[in-house]
Amino acid sequence: MTLSHLNPDLPIGVFDSGIGGLTVVKEIKRLLPNEGIVYFGDTGRVPYGNKSKSTIIDYSLQITKFLESQGVKLIVIACNTATAHALDAVKKATHLPVIGVVDPGAKAAVHYTKSKRIGVIGTVGTVNSKAYEKAIHKLNSDMLVFSQAAPLFVPLVEEGWFTHPATSLIIREYLKPLENERIDTLVLGCTHYPLLKSAIDREVFSSITLVDSGEEVAKDVKSVLEKHKLLRVSKRTEPFQYFVSDLNFRFKELGKMFMDEPFDKVTLVEWQ
């Protein structure tokens, strides 16, 4: 695949089923401060976890086409469920490089584990897809993978309950089965979960390493851009662009919480 026709100053396209993918945006911004970003949050159709595979593929291809129309140079699927179900379809539909969130997290987990016992927490959709299990076993078939759905983590994050006593209780409830399996590495398999990283860290054994897929995705983005000579050299002056399919009243408030900065300019996209 040759991408020599693309301008390195073009932005990176990132999409998610809602707002959680902003944790990935934040990590890309931290690692690659020169890069521009166009973000699409499918807030009108969230959550993806309870949708069929064919529906998630349709949504993902529609968003991919939209991001291409915005002139991006690379697409990041910053949603675990969309990555699990639609990554291959998106790769086939576009000439641009595409990065999902599952493979980078799986690669990091295999790298960090010493006992070969890896835990994965995610939405019901991600856990049922066995996406992380497949990705980890593809890298090393000797790994033992123990998965746990943690659906209540998303509303806890969106309520901002990072230090609430209820959060500690729910974390312990979800993680107890994984600790009983003597895992030494835990993949945060949902883009909301990094905001609970400190709370999770307080509740797990000190010997457990937490894998934040957002951090790992940012490293992969840098690697792919370097490979195709698409890293932006000039300093970014334009603001990030944020698009949503439904501008609910809490999106800007949550966006500010996710990004740790003012979050005012959000554009509504109305599908035809």
Image: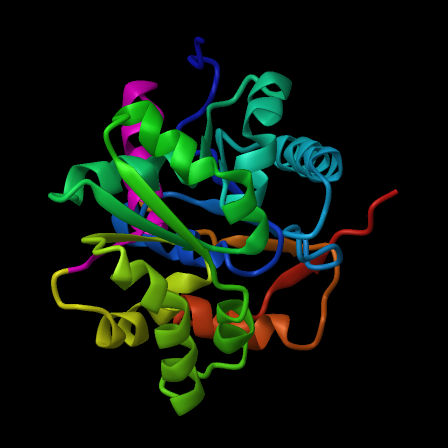
Q: Is residue 169 left or right of residue 155?
A: left
Q: Could you say where residue 55 lies in the image, as x and y percent from the top left?
A: 75, 38
Q: Could you say where residue 201 lies in the image, as x and y percent from the top left?
A: 24, 70
In the figure, 84 relative to 117: above or below? above
Choose top left, top right, bottom left or bottom right for residue 91.
top right
Q: For the view shown, which residue lies furthest in the top direction?
A: 1
Q: Is residue 61 left or right of residue 240?
A: right
At horizontal 26% and vertical 75% (from top left) the residue drawn is 203
Q: Could you say where residue 88 lies in the image, as x and y percent from the top left?
A: 56, 23
**Image quarter hosting the N terminus:** top left
In the figure, 183 relative to 92: above or below? below
**Image quarter hosting the C terminus:** top right
Choose top left, top right, bottom left or bottom right for residue 188.
bottom left
Can residue 133 be spotted in the picture? Answer: yes
Q: Which residues are magenta?
A: 208-231
At horizontal 48% and vertical 46% (from top left) the residue drawn is 37
Secondary structure mostly seen in magenta is: helix
At horizontal 16% and vertical 44% (from top left) the residue drawn is 112
In the figure, 85 relative to 208: above or below? above
At horizontal 69% and vertical 77% (from top left) the residue drawn is 249
Q: Could you say where residue 220 lies in the image, as x and y percent from the top left?
A: 31, 34
